[in-house]
């Protein structure tokens, strides 16, 4: 009786045949074998053995994927549509079974990951994304993109080609094909998020200009649903990963996107879309692409925060939602950027870029925090940070006026502690003493503004207390007389 390995070898030999009928028979036999639990168990076992390195066995998941890719190439351009679809389904099913989490196999396709991405790229260049074959390979692509280790093995050229294919598909936006465009946007988001290298200058420039054209069409169509949300999320990922390399084009991009952004920001009804707009604005602000629009943005934010539907924590609501937190943080960023350049501390504008990047990165949550990573007992950490906070505040009250540079460094350190929520629910009782100190009664320096921003954006750990803290800061620092006085100092 033939063993499992014998049956797999027989099917693969047929797949390699020069005769079309035998290749079809081999594909049919392979699909039947893949329905067998014993065959799948053997393939997983072979994958574990081959993961150590060396040649890829034919009777393994990587071996089957290679055989199916070779089958498509051998079939050539005269392949019938039905046969092409059968091959696409077989490859997707093979990858799905290989990635079955119940098998206990880790990264069974790592050895052929680059080959799979290259194959999908080659195929989608010759098939429409909405065709049956295109849909199968689109589904396969999203499956592979969900595994970061596979993406890291891919060739940058394959990813650039796939990005080009999907963003070009979005250019033909039509409300009648919303589902098709949503799939393209989802794939594009994953491609941009998991790009294994840096985009070439040519590709990055094309992507940026294509985004501008896409949003012009979305604005004309008045689309405010999941298509706009998906495409804007793609743009945010692109700006986050590649924006620093192209600040001037980002400025030109915003000029074209402004009608769409302002319409969604002012009139949009989708909370998630408005949250994505806030994220876009903050990213562009970091890239200095909004410098000429900040006053207008501040006026819009004043209206948004003044709406009757905006909750400050009154009544039964003790914690604001994520969207309202994003708006508050955006407003804090706008205030800071409007005043920081004009009222920078002496010598701060000449600080090395490396030092500024260290401070900026310290003010952003770490990846572990974003992922909800658990750590030491927060109560112990809060107590330790409170000792540091109290020491800095005490030093400021006694020695702070003797050295302007050290004074600014101390305020920056306090801003970092506040922004990282190191004091947890204990921050508000510490703030009043700080705000009564001289740095907050005269012209506001850049570091003082940075600390105000950090305190204002503190989020959700102490409920009503933090909302009262925000209201206290608003009552104290919203009046523009504070900034105009700083300008005369």
Image: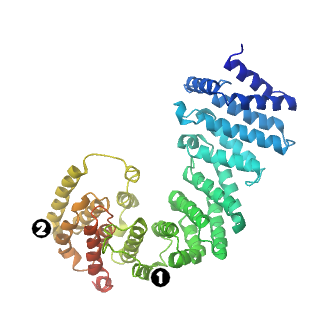
Label 1 CA crowd tier, 10 Å (few <14, some 14–19, many 20+)? few
Q: Position of residue 6 (x, y in %)?
A: 71, 18
The residue that label 1 is drawn on is 296
Q: CA distance from mark 1 to mark 2?
A: 41 Å
> Between 400 and 182, which is closer to the camera in this rendering?
182
Q: Residue at x 32, y 81 (%)?
A: 478
Q: Which quarter of the figure has residue 361?
A: bottom left
Taking the view exactly as shown, the residue that stands out farthest to the top is 1
Q: Compared to 483, does 370 lie above or below?
A: above
Residue 409: image x %, image y %?
A: 26, 63
Task: Report whether 375 appears left or right of 106.
Answer: left
Viewer-proximal residue, 334 or 178?
A: 178
Q: Dot 2 surroundings within 10 Å: few (below 14), some, or many (20 or more)?
A: few
Query: What residue is drawn where x is 27% and y is 75%?
Result: 473
Toward which corner of the image does residue 163 lie, by quadrant? bottom right
Q: Is residue 19 left or right of residue 10?
A: right
| Residue in front for this viewpoint, 254 or 74 | 74
Write down the residue under mark 2. Answer: 398
Q: Determine the secondary structure under disc 2.
A: helix
Compare marks 1 and 2 and give the one earlier in the sequence: 1
Residue 326: % across, % down: 41, 68
Residue 237 falls left or right of residue 355: right
Kindly report which numbered mark, 1 or 2, lies closer to the viewer in this rendering: 1
Residue 31 numbered mark, or none: none
> Residue 89 vs residue 219: left or right?
right
Residue 148 lies, with reference to residue 411, above or below; the image says: above
From the top left corner, tell me how far across and down residue 269 is, in percent.
52, 74
Q: Quadrant of the C terminus?
A: bottom left
- Work out whether 347 lies above or below 477: above
Q: Quadrant of the N terminus?
A: top right
């Amino acid at each position: 009786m033939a063993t499992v390995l014998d049956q797999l070898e027989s099917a693969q030999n047929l797949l390699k045949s020069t005769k079309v009928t035998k290749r079809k028979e081999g594909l049919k036999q392979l699909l039947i074998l893949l329905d067998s639990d014993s065959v799948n168990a053997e393939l997983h076992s072979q994958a574990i053995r081959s993961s150590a390195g060396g040649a890829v066995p034919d009777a393994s998941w990587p071996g089957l994927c290679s055989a199916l890719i070779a089958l498509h190439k051998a079939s050539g351009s005269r392949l019938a549509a039905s046969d092409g679809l059968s091959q696409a389904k077989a490859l997707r099913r093979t990858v799905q079974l290989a990635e079955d989490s119940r098998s206990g196999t880790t990264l069974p396709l790592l050895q052929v990951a680059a080959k799979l991405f290259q194959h999908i790229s080659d195929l989608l260049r010759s098939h429409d994304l909405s065709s049956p074959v295109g849909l199968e390979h689109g589904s396969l692509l999203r499956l592979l993109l969900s595994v970061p280790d596979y993406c890291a093995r891919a060739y940058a050229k394959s990813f650039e080609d796939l990005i080009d294919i999907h963003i070009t598909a979005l250019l033909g936006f039509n409300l009648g094909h919303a589902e098709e465009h949503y799939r393209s946007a989802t794939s594009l988001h994953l491609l941009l998020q998991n790009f294994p290298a840096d985009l070439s200058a040519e590709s990055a420039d094309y992507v940026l200009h294509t985004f501008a054209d896409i949003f012009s069409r979305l604005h004309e169509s008045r689309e405010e649903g999941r298509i706009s949300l998906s495409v804007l999320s793609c743009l945010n990922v692109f700006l986050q990963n590649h924006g620093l390399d192209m600040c001037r084009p980002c400025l030109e991009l915003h000029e074209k996107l402004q009608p769409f952004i302002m319409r969604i920001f002012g009139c949009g009804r989708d909370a998630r879309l408005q949250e994505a707009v806030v994220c876009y604005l903050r990213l562009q602000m970091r890239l200095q692409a909004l410098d000429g629009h900040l006053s207008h943005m501040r006026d819009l934010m004043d209206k948004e925060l003044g709406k009757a539907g905006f909750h400050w924590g009154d009544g039964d609501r003790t914690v604001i939602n994520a969207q309202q937190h994003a708006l508050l943080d955006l407003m804090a960023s706008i205030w800071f950027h409007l005043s920081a350049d004009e009222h920078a501390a002496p010598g701060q504008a000449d600080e090395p870029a490396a030092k500024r990047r260290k401070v900026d990165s310290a003010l952003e949550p770490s990846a572990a925090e974003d992922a909800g990573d658990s750590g030491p007992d927060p109560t112990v950490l809060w107590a330790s940070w409170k000792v540091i906070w109290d020491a800095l505040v005490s030093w400021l009250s006694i020695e702070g006026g003797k050295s302007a540079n050290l004074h600014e460094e101390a305020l920056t350190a306090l801003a970092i502690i506040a922004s990282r929520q190191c004091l947890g629910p204990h921050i508000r009782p510490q703030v009043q003493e700080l705000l009564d100190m001289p740095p907050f009664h005269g012209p506001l320096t850049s570091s003082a503004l940075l600390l105000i921003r950090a305190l204002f954006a503190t989020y959700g750990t102490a409920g009503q207390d933090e909302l009262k803290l925000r209201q206290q800061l608003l009552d104290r620092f919203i009046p523009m007389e504070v900034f105009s006085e700083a300008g005369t100092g």
